[in-house]
Image: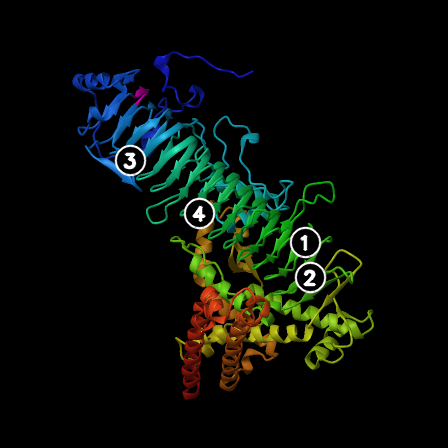
């Protein structure tokens, strides 16, 4: 049975905070802290009250309506007031936003204990209770706007008197809730990543909760807020929300328990048919057309549209989900997911990823329990109608060909193409596929991600480059695995790993015996069928080539601004061993630095997440140096030549080799795009080559190829000047 309480009409709008939670006997304490106004407020005079009554306005207590000296009673019509209300300055003007023109004032509404800013236009708001409304705000045709005294605005906190069961949690990466975190305004993907890991460390997990709760008050009495210059129209329910400035909200069904960040520079828009509950929305987001999101964090400059569903998930900056469903997932920045039948569940996706139409990651429940986990490095791309089984793990830039993959997989070779050979019952992997066969798409993605990064508050340095410490380390590991597999193909299986690798290295360098024998991997798929590697020699060589090019790029960037002597000094500080890096929310960080932060959190040196964010900022500034040191150590390892033996000739040859690699990369960019023009099946839908060019454009005028050609020319000029600098020393 529904419990409907009754109270005296003169008490409506008062006693917002239950008596047992009133610590200072003033229910307006938090409200007064949040209502910013330079105006002086006063009570209404008799003539103003008379005009208000003549205009069909009523109030439970005219004494509790405060106004400024710029009050215009004629601008308030057919409105009911209850409780303590403050009305800011008024003017004889109308507000105009995108052809919606409304006279300022309050019309045909019910206002319960609210603060209203200057020159607001409130029309047909049937119930507006316990809100702080900013200046120049337009509210029109809204059924219900209300606030609970224990409102949390999407944060995973508890107010005085709350029980733990009421706490909002994001059950990420795994459907069983074992990696859940508590959302909060300002939460970054790095926070979520650190918090969702190390679940065995009880002390660390306790500290994470304490860090979050330290940023919020347990007290009741916070009002919902609508920031300056917001426009909200044709909406059903808005409850317990905090909205920043300049937001545009239209036609939504329900907004409940949310923080909606917005500013004049990065304004957020929410459109028709959306229902958003228990979430945090970042700056500059776009949410349109039937979106359903529950228990979520949407980071800055991201989009949800066309019926997207985001549930129990964190979506990183600069991402788009359209028409799809995402459940229980942690997704790092620059994720793209479109098409109505893409499904992503119980996953950690480390950014710059793309879900194709029909891709289904999760929800097979093969163990009759909640889904396990998918973990994928940067650049993850399951192709059309790919179905994957939990638990699986994928190296960076793994591309998966259409198919139903029935077994768990651990793909450790980066930049690979993975396909399901059903006819021969085997899994087939082409390592380094992107470099060998689709350089155009690979390099183009880098520029796309950089262009889409519209964050104004870049408090973390997100790595978009294909060649970076994480992918380079994976290439080294992949080369070792290919060596072992090559050795195993011709050696006794009982031979030691080191012996297999040494023999395999000789085979790969000489390409001896690899054409006659299938190169097979172990521990890749949880099945008894073969896992076959195609073109291992090409992959092995291109991994080496790209590692050298990565190192050369960092050396060239450093030598551009320093002398040869300064470069030699830098070499002295390089550690012999190549450092491990961790992708922490899209930011690549040396693992030892991450461990230091976790240690500082355990001992209480770091007391809030805002303090942890200062570490991220510091690491962002240090990243160029960290990357250079990693590149130098990588070069020493791949050339098997210690840094103390590097001279001008060695560095000069590395730079010259990088020019050849850069030219090769450009030619591969052109060639991989040229295939689309030379393929007769691509041509057959056009009357002639001229129509084809009119429809898809001329290859010579391709803007990306032209940009890459300019980059190549700049690179050639830069390397020539550096080589001259080295020679002249």
Give the CA separation, mark 4 to mark 3.
Answer: 25 Å
Q: Does residue 632 appear anywhere in the picture?
A: no
For the residue pair 118 and 462, the one nearer the viewer reads as 118
Of the residues under marks 4 and 3, which one precedes in the sequence?
A: 3
In the figure, residue 270 lies in which quadrant?
A: top left
In the figure, residue 177 lies in which quadrant?
A: top right
Of the residues under marks 1 and 3, which one precedes in the sequence?
A: 3
170 displayed left or right of 20:
right
Q: Which residue is mark 4?
A: 610
- Residue at horizontal 54 percent and vertical 80 percent from the top: 644
Of the residues under marks 4 and 2, which one precedes in the sequence?
A: 2
Circle 2 or circle 3, nearest the eye: 2
Q: Please tell me how crowded label 4 is: few (under 14), some (14-19), or many (20+) other residues with Cα within 10 Å.
A: some
Q: Which mark is residue 392?
A: 1
Mark 4: secondary structure? helix
Give the CA separation, mark 1 to mark 2.
Answer: 15 Å
Q: Which residue is mark 3?
A: 36
């Amino acid at each position: 049975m529904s419990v409907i309480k009754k109270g005296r009409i003169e008490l409506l709008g008062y006693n917002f905070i239950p008596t047992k939670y009133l610590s200072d006997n003033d229910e307006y304490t938090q409200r007064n802290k949040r209502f910013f106004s330079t105006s002086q407020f006063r009570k209404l005079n008799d003539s103003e009250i008379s005009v208000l009554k003549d205009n069909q306005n009523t109030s439970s207590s005219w004494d509790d309506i405060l106004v400024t000296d710029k009050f215009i009673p004629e601008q308030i019509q057919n409105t009911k007031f209850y409780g303590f209300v403050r009305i800011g300055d008024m003017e004889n003007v109308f507000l105009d936003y995108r052809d919606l023109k409304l006279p300022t004032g309050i019309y045909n509404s019910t206002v319960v204990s609210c603060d209203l800013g200057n020159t607001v236009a409130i029309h047909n708001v049937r119930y507006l209770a316990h809100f702080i409304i900013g200046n120049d705000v337009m509210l029109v045709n809204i059924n219900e706007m209300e606030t609970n005294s224990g409102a949390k605005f999407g944060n995973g906190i508890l107010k005085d008197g709350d029980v733990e069961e009421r706490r909002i949690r994001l059950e990420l990466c795994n459907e069983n809730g074992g990696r859940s975190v508590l959302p909060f305004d300002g939460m970054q993907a790095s926070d979520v990543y650190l918090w969702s890991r190390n679940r065995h460390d009880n002390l660390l997990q306790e500290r994470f909760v304490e860090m979050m709760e330290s940023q919020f008050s347990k007290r009741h009495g916070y009002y919902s807020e609508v920031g300056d210059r917001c426009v909200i129209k044709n909406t059903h329910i808005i409850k317990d929300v905090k909205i920043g400035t300049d937001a545009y909200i239209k036609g939504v069904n329900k907004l409940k328990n949310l923080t909606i960040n917005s500013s004049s520079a990065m304004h957020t828009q929410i459109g028709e048919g959306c229902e958003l509950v228990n979430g945090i929305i970042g700056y500059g987001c776009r949410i349109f057309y039937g979106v359903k999101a529950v228990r979520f964090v949407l980071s800055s400059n991201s989009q949800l549209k066309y019926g997207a569903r985001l549930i129990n998930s964190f979506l990183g900056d600069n991402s788009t989900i359209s028409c799809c469903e995402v459940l229980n997932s942690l997704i790092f920045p620059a994720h793209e997911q479109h098409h109505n039948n893409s499904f992503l569940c119980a996953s950690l996706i480390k950014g710059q990823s793309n879900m194709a139409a029909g891709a289904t990651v999760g929800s097979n429940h093969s163990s009759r329990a909640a889904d396990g986990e998918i973990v994928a490095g940067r650049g993850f791309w399951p192709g059309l109608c790919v179905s994957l089984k939990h638990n699986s793990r994928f190296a960076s830039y793994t591309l998966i060909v259409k198919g139903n993959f029935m077994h768990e997989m651990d793909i450790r070779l980066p930049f690979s193409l993975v396909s399901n050979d059903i006819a021969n019952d085997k899994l087939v992997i082409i390592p380094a596929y992107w470099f060998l066969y689709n350089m155009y798409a690979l390099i183009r993605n880098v520029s796309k991600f950089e262009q889409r990064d519209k964050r104004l508050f870049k408090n973390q340095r997100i790595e978009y480059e294909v060649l970076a410490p994480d992918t380079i380390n994976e290439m080294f590991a992949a080369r070792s695995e290919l060596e072992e597999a090559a050795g195993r193909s011709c050696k006794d299986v009982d031979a030691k790993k080191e012996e297999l690798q040494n023999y395999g290295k000789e085979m790969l360098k000489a390409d001896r015996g690899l054409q006659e024998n299938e190169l097979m991997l172990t521990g890749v798929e949880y099945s008894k069928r073969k896992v076959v590697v195609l073109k291992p020699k090409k992959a092995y060589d291109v991994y080496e080539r790209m590692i050298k090019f990565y190192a050369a790029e960092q050396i060239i960037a450093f030598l551009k601004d320093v002398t040869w002597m300064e470069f030699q000094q830098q070499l002295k500080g390089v550690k012999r061993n190549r450092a491990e890096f961790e992708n922490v929310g899209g930011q690549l960080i040396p693992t030892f630095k991450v461990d230091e932060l976790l240690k500082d959190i355990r001992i209480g040196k770091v007391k809030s997440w805002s303090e942890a964010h200062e570490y991220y900022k510091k690491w962002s500034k240090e990243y160029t140096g960290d990357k250079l040191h990693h590149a130098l150590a990588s070069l020493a390892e791949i050339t098997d030549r210690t840094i103390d033996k590097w001279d001008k000739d060695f560095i000069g040859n590395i730079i010259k080799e990088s020019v050849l690699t850069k030219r090769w990369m450009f030619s591969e960019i052109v060639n991989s795009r040229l295939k689309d023009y030379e393929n007769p099946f691509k041509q057959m839908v056009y009357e002639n080559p001229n129509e084809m060019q009119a429809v898809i454009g001329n290859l010579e005028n391709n803007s990306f190829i032209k940009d890459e050609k300019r980059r190549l020319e700049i690179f050639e000029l830069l390397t020539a000047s550096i080589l001259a600098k080295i020679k002249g020393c």
